[in-house]
Amino acid sequence: MATARVAVIGGSGFYQMDGLSDIEERAVETPFGSPSDSVVLGTLDGERVAFLPRHGRGHRISPTHLNVRANIYALKTLGVDTLLSFSAVGSLREHIEPTSFVVPDQLFDHTKSRSSSFFGQGIVAHVGMAEPYCPCLRDTLIAAGHAEGSTVHDGGQYICIEGPQFSTVGESKTYRQWGMDIIGMTAATEAKLAREAEMCYATLAAVTDFDVWHPDHATVTTEMILANLSKNVENGKRIVRDAIRRVTPLRDCSCRSALASAIATNPDVVPGDVRERLGLFVGKYLR
């Protein structure tokens, strides 16, 4: 089976990875169902890369109904240990302007209906999420953004809401009071599952609007978001491509061993079907 060490999950407006050669598509089935789309494997600047459009080609799947467990599992099956995410977000701060980028360093999970763990039935694991994004991969994205001449904000708190509706004014103002900087609908679930899969994960967040808190800007609409994304997605693709060139196989982070001390269940009582389903993640720890 063809493999890739680095993967890109493309969000709204980012439905294909430019510059790939030797392309093949893999329809990967997982114990958690089907991922959002076939995974595209190709070579980019000498690096084998996997690409998955988060919402499916044509933007068919809403944030609430994304099968993130299947997405992460499928990429892990293909050998991925480094995951770059591209996401559209709204800004909750005056200085974070539309068409700029943010590489957030913190997350607040405000979702309600997501399956955000591979564990819980037959085996329990509690991974650390104090730093939800890989610090080394964050540095890589920031360096790539600066090298490409884009406005990239280093750090920020990303609040992940359920959606698919946008915020009310009251909600948006409350999130600002809570200290949140940007708002989106996908990163929290991906970050948690990537950590359980022992992947390095970071997000390049493309700012499309001021959400609805800003009195001098129009109410956020899908049309507005897509218009600003069209201006920014090409810059985002260049940043991601540059970041892939900068990714090194060995990094000084704990992402790759997140499960080493996280499994609470006695291996002797883990059911066989659970061992089989999660062997991709826990096999090395349950011997």
Image (cartoon, rainbow, N blue to C red):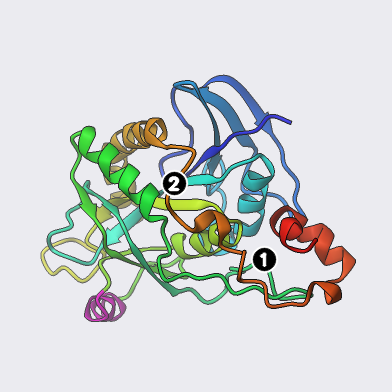
Mark on residue 7? none
Q: Nearer the viewer, residue 192 or 170?
A: 192
Name the magenta segment's main secondary structure.
helix
Q: Residue 286, located in which quarter of the rendered image?
A: bottom right
Q: Amino acid at mark 1?
A: Phe
Q: Position of residue 97 (x, y in %)?
A: 17, 54
Q: Nearer the viewer, residue 87 or 254?
A: 254
Residue 68 left/right relative to 222: right
Q: Nearer the viewer, residue 184 or 197?
A: 197
Task: Please provide the residue range marked out in magenta.
Answer: 169-179
Magenta span has 171?
A: yes
Q: Earlier in the sequence, mark 2 or mark 1?
A: 1
Q: Position of residue 221 (x, y in %)?
A: 31, 57
Q: Mark 1, residues whose alpha carbon is within 10 Å: few (<14), some, or many (≥20)? A: many
Residue matched to label 2: 251
Mark-to-mark CA distance, 2 and 1: 25 Å
Instruction: Inspect this view and state whether residue 32 appears.
Output: no
Kindly state the secondary structure of the residue where label 1 is placed: loop
Residue matched to label 1: 118
The residue drawn where x is 24% and y is 76% is 179
